[in-house]
């Protein structure tokens, strides 16, 4: 009996940080394991306590990887029920304050033995490989699949000298994904185009949101009023997460939107400024701290307004649709996946935004069909992932041309491979010099884990 292939999913964040790259790879690992065709390992960053306090909410901290793993598994079990069998490993990492991101420390390919190095899934491949120094991913693993989560260029453009930074970052991202990934999945066309990439939304929603949607559907079919509240928005409270666009739209069209009542939910660095801007409006717009989107306080809202264009595929939009709500969003590549849903109304102009918003508040949502509900599920997302990643068993490779043939014919694939290996050698050389790493934004002294991290992770002889 042939052994199962092993899939290792590497990601850039872990619960309790409620960010997309912590949550979605966790669901992906669970649902791939549920499918039963592979052995699955999820590899997440381990932060020492000082960094944990900077990243995790409510000053949560863990004394060991085992303690954090227990928290992650309990969180997941509360959402999907009994857990399938999969492993959770940790790699050493540090938090970069200026990037507001977790970056790997050392060669994280070492967290997986060579015997299990079949398929690697790099969630945010550019992020994981910017400063990678060590074993080449394509050498260690038979197949490396990247999943692009973040529209880095859009975020960078909003910073000082942003367009210059974005220009440089665009080429660096293309370079590292090309030399380290066999294939890249872009969640939407809102992401940067990189070599060997395809566009496919391989994310689903937490099953809880689908259950809420089914409950609302039953209430509607029984003739009960199921949506008592008006409009809302939920998202991390930083200007770049849609709050700039939303408050500008509300401010410019206060007269046409008179009577609109809307609540904004979020926590973040710009909370005070967002609240002050909302208070200056002549509309009933109230601001509250962030909550879990599955909280019962959101069940009775009818309209979710999300003008953000920095997301790749907005998780909260998918969640709102799953709960049976009407969604008002921009006609933008990041929302392409939602176009086929009858409750998703897209605007291209400010005038359309006003018309669609007022119409949505006056009408009832269309109940989701079983097919549409399935499209939003993690089961469907996993099916799409397996298909586009093409993670079938290895096939025999073609024999190399004979020595006599080589005099007459230069294999272009072999030439390309040699050039790629040379490029990877250059990247590995540059990333091995501390001064060069720091110039390009790496965390100082991150070539190897420090003594504290070695001890916490149980490393010996590294």
Image (cartoon, helix red, strand yellow):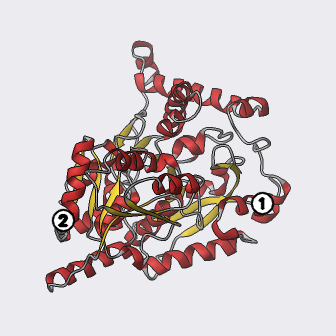
Q: Is residue 231 above or below residue 171?
A: below
Give the percent coordinates (x, y) of residue 13. 59, 57
Q: Which mark is residue 340?
A: none
Q: Is residue 416 above or below residue 364?
A: above
Q: Residues within 10 Å of mark 2 (few under 14, many from 20)?
A: few
Quadrant holding the N terminus: bottom left
Q: Secondary structure at mark 1?
A: helix
Outermost residue, top direction?
408
Give the percent coordinates (x, y) of residue 442. 70, 39
Give the percent coordinates (x, y) of residue 314. 39, 54
Task: Determine the residue positioned at 27% across, 67% down.
Answer: 325
**Mark 1–mark 2 distance (CA, rounded to whole Å):** 50 Å
Q: Which mark is residue 362?
A: 2
Looking at this view, is 9 or 277 the one in front?
277
Task: Determine the residue positioned at 34% across, 44% down.
Answer: 252
Outermost residue, right direction?
451
Mark whose residue sits in front, 1 or 2: 2
Q: Are marks 1 and 2 in contact (CB under 8 Å)?
A: no
Looking at this view, is 299 or 147 the one in front?
299
Give the percent coordinates (x, y) of residue 61. 71, 70
Per the image, the residue denoted by label 1 is 50
Left or right for 137, reference 395: right
Q: Earlier in the sequence, mark 1 or mark 2?
A: 1
Q: Quadrant of residue 33?
A: bottom left
Q: Is residue 161 above or below residue 229?
A: above
Q: Secondary structure at mark 2?
A: helix
Left or right for 49, reference 222: right
């Amino acid at each position: 009996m042939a052994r199962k292939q092993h899939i290792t999913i590497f990601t850039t964040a872990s619960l309790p940080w409620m960010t997309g790259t912590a949550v979605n790879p966790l669901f992906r690992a669970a649902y791939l394991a549920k499918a039963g065709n592979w052995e699955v390992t999820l590899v997440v960053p381990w932060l020492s306590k000082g960094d944990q306090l900077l990243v995790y909410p409510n000053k949560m901290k863990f004394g060991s990887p085992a303690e954090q793993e227990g928290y992650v598994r309990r969180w997941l079990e509360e959402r999907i029920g009994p857990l399938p069998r999969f492993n959770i490993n940790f790699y050493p990492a540090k938090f970069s304050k200026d990037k507001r991101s977790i970056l790997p420390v050392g060669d994280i390919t070492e967290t997986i033995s060579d015997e299990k190095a079949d398929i690697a899934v790099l969630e945010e491949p550019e992020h994981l490989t910017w400063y990678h120094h060590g074993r080449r991913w394509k050498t260690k693993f038979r197949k490396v699949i990247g999943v692009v989560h973040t529209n880095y260029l859009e975020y960078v453009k909003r910073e000082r000298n942003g367009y210059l930074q974005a220009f440089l970052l665009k080429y660096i991202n293309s370079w590292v994904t090309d030399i380290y990934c066999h294939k890249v999945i872009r969640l939407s066309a809102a992401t940067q185009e990189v070599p060997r990439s395809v566009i496919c939304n391989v994310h689903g929603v937490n099953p809880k949101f689908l259950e809420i949607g089914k409950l609302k559907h039953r209430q509607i079919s029984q003739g009960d009023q199921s949506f008592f509240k008006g409009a809302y928005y939920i998202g991390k409270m930083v200007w770049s997460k849609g709050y700039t666009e939303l408050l500008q739209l509300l401010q410019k069209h206060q007269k046409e939107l008179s009577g609109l009542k809307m609540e904004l939910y979020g926590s973040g660095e710009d909370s005070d400024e967002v609240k002050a801007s909302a208070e200056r409006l002549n509309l009933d717009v109230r601001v509250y701290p962030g909550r879990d989107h599955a909280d019962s306080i959101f069940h009775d809202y009818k309209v979710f307004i999300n003008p953000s264009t920095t997301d790749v595929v907005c998780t909260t939009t998918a969640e709102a649709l799953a709960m049976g709500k009407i969604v008002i969003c921009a006609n933008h590549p990041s929302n392409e996946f939602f176009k086929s849903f009858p409750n998703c109304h897209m605007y291209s102009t400010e005038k359309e935004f006003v018309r669609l918003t007022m119409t949505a508040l006056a009408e009832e949502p269309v109940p989701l069909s079983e097919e549409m509900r399935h499209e939003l599920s993690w089961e469907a997302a996993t099916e799409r992932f397996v298909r586009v990643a093409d993670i079938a068993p290895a096939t025999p490779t073609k024999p190399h041309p004979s020595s006599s043939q080589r005099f007459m014919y230069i294999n272009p694939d072999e030439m390309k491979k040699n050039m790629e290996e040379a490029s990877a050698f250059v990247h590995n050389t540059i990333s091995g010099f501390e001064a060069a790493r720091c110039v390009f934004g790496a965390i100082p002294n991150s070539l190897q884990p420090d003594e504290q991290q070695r001890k916490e992770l149980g490393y010996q002889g590294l």
